[in-house]
Amino acid sequence: MKVIHGFSYKWKDSFLERISEKFESCCFLSNVREESEKSGLVPLQQLLILKLLNESMRIHDVDDGVFTIKNRLRHKRILLIFDDVNQLEQLDNLAGNHIWFGSGSRIIITTRDKHLLQLADDIYDVEGLDDGEALHLLSLKAFKTNHPPKDFLELSKDFVDYAKGLPLAIETLGFFLFNRGVDIWKGTLKRLKEFPESTILQKLKIGYDGLQETEQKIFLYIACFFNHEEKNSVVQTLHYLGLYPDVGLRVLVDKSLIKMNDSEVCVPDLLQEMCQEIVREECREDPGKRSILWSFEDINNVLKNNTGTEAIQGMALKLPRLKEANWNPESFSKMRHLKLLRIDNVHLLHDPKHLPDSLRVLIWSGYSSKSLPSSLHLTGLSLFGRLDKPDYNWRYDMVIPGSVIPKWFRYQSMGAEVNIKEPSSHLCTNEWMGIAVCVVFCSLSHHQIKGYSSLSYQLIVNGNELNATPTIGQEVNSSDHVWLLYLLNRYYKELEGDLKLLKECEANEFS
């Protein structure tokens, strides 16, 4: 069996013409995913038999179809092509084994799902068309010639750039633009930038509809919030949101919906447009009733006019430069299900009076206030800069905007270090809970942390450095921040050398 992995498109005619003479009979079954979901496998079995044997047969059920295919075709040298397969069950009941067919037979499938590749003898990964191939395909569909006319050449290149090498998009646009004038071409291109072609998006949406709910959320978050961002940061954020990214990301990669390597996660442009359109369809007239928001226009509208609702679960605004916003101080009070809030480069004229307790991820660069709203309860909040894994139960830390160390920290000092003394008896009992540390790092120009760097602290006991050096990776743009860190006693019990230092004298001096 040969598998073509990637987005399928209409290539059957030229392909069959070249190789059909090598086989006794050929069969191309298109849209296997769509047809099996709509009508089941029996109609596909009947169609396969009709094309290969030129006989119309009545099949009672799937098992009857399997029996008929195996017995009627086992001596025929045939070519079978299944387009857009997404379930192993489809192959099992249409072409379950090579021995069903005669010697020299070939089975080819196209699929977006990598988990089906284990069945293949040969695998061909389909990349998008290059610009030359895409221009040729568009010309064939729009002008019925190999090259676009001179007056349409630059416009054709613009449409090719929009389609990003996706044959489905190029064919759909070509059919629509056939026999249309230059003005229609220009108007269509302008409209696409604001309103994507619905026919294309509906066909692309088939892959989205086949996902589980958590996988759909991951896909939407990546497309709308995290496209082309650093992989580890995306995985960490999705963990905090309780979306099981280790499973979900693999599914999305296998289904060719996202691309992921060791450093980056990304969604192709047209799939990103599809995801954004899915969200807009939740409520076109009122962005405050959508599940996620990402554009300044929508977010500013909702927060300025205080029209947010319980529907909003995620909000991310990443501006390239600082922008002033006059948001209603009460604007977050109605968003009781908001879990992710990311704001970059926004200067507020009025500090928010409320942030919802439902928050699990808060990233706010340039937060103007010295502290978070007093009404916010931090229970369960996983803030950016937190590196502990969810299954760890010995380290908890967070970074929040602010410049004041809480009063309940017993030892406080200005500068880069603080010295304390604690009797060793406190550290030798099971009552010792752990060590809490609070660090303020400020936004003065000579202290500013540029881009992505690390922040760490070192505990010294009786002049000896402990091996444990907690570190966070932190991006801070323009405001003071507080790093709160709590290490349970288990953290040090797993490091015997450090525990020995903590217990070895009557008065331990920390610095």
Image: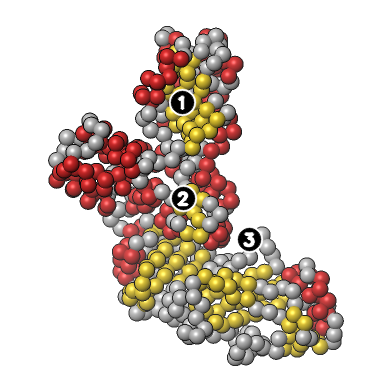
* Amino acid type at image mark 1: Phe
Residue at left offset 46%, top offset 45%: 257
In the image, residue 240 above or below residue 432: above
Q: Sort mark 3 into few (<14), some (14-19) or many (20+) by Cα contacts within 10 Å.
A: few
Residue 209 on image: x %, y %: 44, 41
Label 3 or label 1, whichever comes before in sequence order: 1
Which quadrant is home to the N terminus?
top right
The tag on residue 219 is 2
Note whether residue 433 is visible.
Answer: no
The residue tagged with tag 3: helix, strand or loop?
A: loop
Residue carrying label 1:
82
The residue nearer to you, when weighing 264 against 328, is 264
Cα–Cα gap, marks 3 and 1? 43 Å
In the image, which disc is placed on residue 172? none
List x then y, in percent, for residue 349.
34, 79
Q: CA distance from mark 2 to mark 1?
A: 27 Å
Query: Local crowd at mark 1 within 10 Å, few (<14), some, or many (≥20)?
Result: many
Local secondary structure at mark 1: strand
Give the residue displayed 82% in from the left and 83% down from the top: 424
The amino acid marked with disc number 2 is Phe
Task: Identify the residue under disc 3.
Answer: 390
Amino acid beneath label 3: Pro
Relative vertical location of residue 28 with respect to residue 149 in this rendering, above or below: above
Q: Residue at x 57, y 70 (%)?
A: 473
Residue situated furthest bottom in the rendering: 414
